[in-house]
Amino acid sequence: MTELASDPAGPALPAYLLRYPNPWGLEHRREKGLEELRYVVARCRFGYIGLRLDEVLEIVRRLDEQPAGTASLLVDDLIDRIGAMTIDEVEQLVDVLLDLHRRDMPGWCRLDLDRGLQRLLFLLRVPKAHDLAYECARSERTYRRWAAYKFYGEHGLDERARRLLAGQVAAGTIEQPSSAAYSYYPGALVARDQTLVNRLGLAAVLAVAPTTQQRKEAIEFAMAQLAPETVAGICEDYPQELVWAVRSQGRTDYLPIIMDMVDDYRDDPYLLHRVVECLTRIGGTAEIDYAVHVASKVLESAAVEL
């Protein structure tokens, strides 16, 4: 426990610390401060602060010659600089990273590059970065592939990436994440790209899209191209996503399909409530009254069972 906070007879706290009413809050602040202080001192001791960009890039280029622990400090320095870098300077960085990616390096150095690409690649907002992303997406190294997926999640797919992912969907080899911490799934990239939804077909995309949200987005793309009956047939096993998409788009031409769902899903209260919500957006008085009547019967039956 922090002595300063716990001892009433101790020195008075500065005004800016008085907003921490609990001793553990001050202790946490101190521990966090010491951790960050050690790190910034380490960065300064490595000597990268204040170097010109070309000097830093030369150090990055010789990453396999640097002391252990250097890579993360270099990445931190580059992240600090990226916002102020010109397009030409960012392209120089991309060239250096491409060279490292293609080079045969010691195992520890490859791992450092993997981690660096995960933190840096999606920040590189120049056309040439798509070349690096594409090579990483085809890499045998998992971290580099996921660095590429994160890049595509931020910047969108180009035609090379579309062909790569389309081939994986067709072959049934599209990659699933090894950790729930990953935010950018290849299946999600497919579902969020209208060109791929149109090219592969809605059924194939729904089979690989990992979440309800992404399946709903793919359905919305298909709704712009296909007739309601066709979309409904494809979405037979995805009724929740279909209802959500119809409500989101306000598509009154789907009203007959949604009305059929009132009866089809009366045994699933969760889906039924989504259907009723959808009708409040696209239905008229008669349709809403009927849905409320069915829902009321379901609620009465549930009350009797309880």
Image (tube, grey):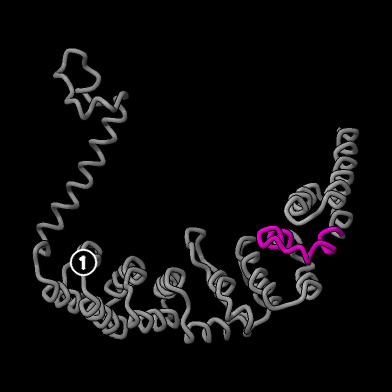
What residue is shown at x 72% (from left), y 53% (from top)? 281
Q: Is residue 201 left or right of residue 97?
A: right
- The disc labelled 1 sits on which kind of residue? Ala
Query: Residue placed farthest to the top in the image?
Result: 9
**Mark 1 lies on residue:** 84
The C terminus - image quarter: top right
What residue span does the magenta drawing correspond to? 242-259
Q: In the rendering, at what x and y percent does residue 227 appear? A: 77, 76
Q: In the rendering, at what x and y percent does residue 188 appear? A: 56, 69
The N terminus - image quarter: top left
What residue is shown at x 30% (from left), y 72% (from top)? 113
What residue is shown at x 41% (from left), y 82% (from top)? 134
Local crowd at mark 1 within 10 Å, few (<14), some, or many (≥20)? few
- When the figure is inspected, residue 8 is found, relative to residue 200, above or below; the finding is above
Tell me where residue 155 sits by quadrant.
bottom left
Tell me where residue 54 sits by quadrant.
bottom left
Q: In the rendering, at what x and y percent does residue 196 appear? A: 59, 80
Q: Main secondary structure of the magenta part?
A: helix
User: Residue 252 magenta-drawn?
Assistant: yes
Query: Residue placed farthest to the front in the image?
Result: 285
Q: Secondary structure at mark 1?
A: loop
What residue is shown at x 67% (from left), y 74% (from top)? 224
User: Residue 35 magenta-drawn?
Assistant: no
Q: Is residue 9 left or right of residue 279?
A: left
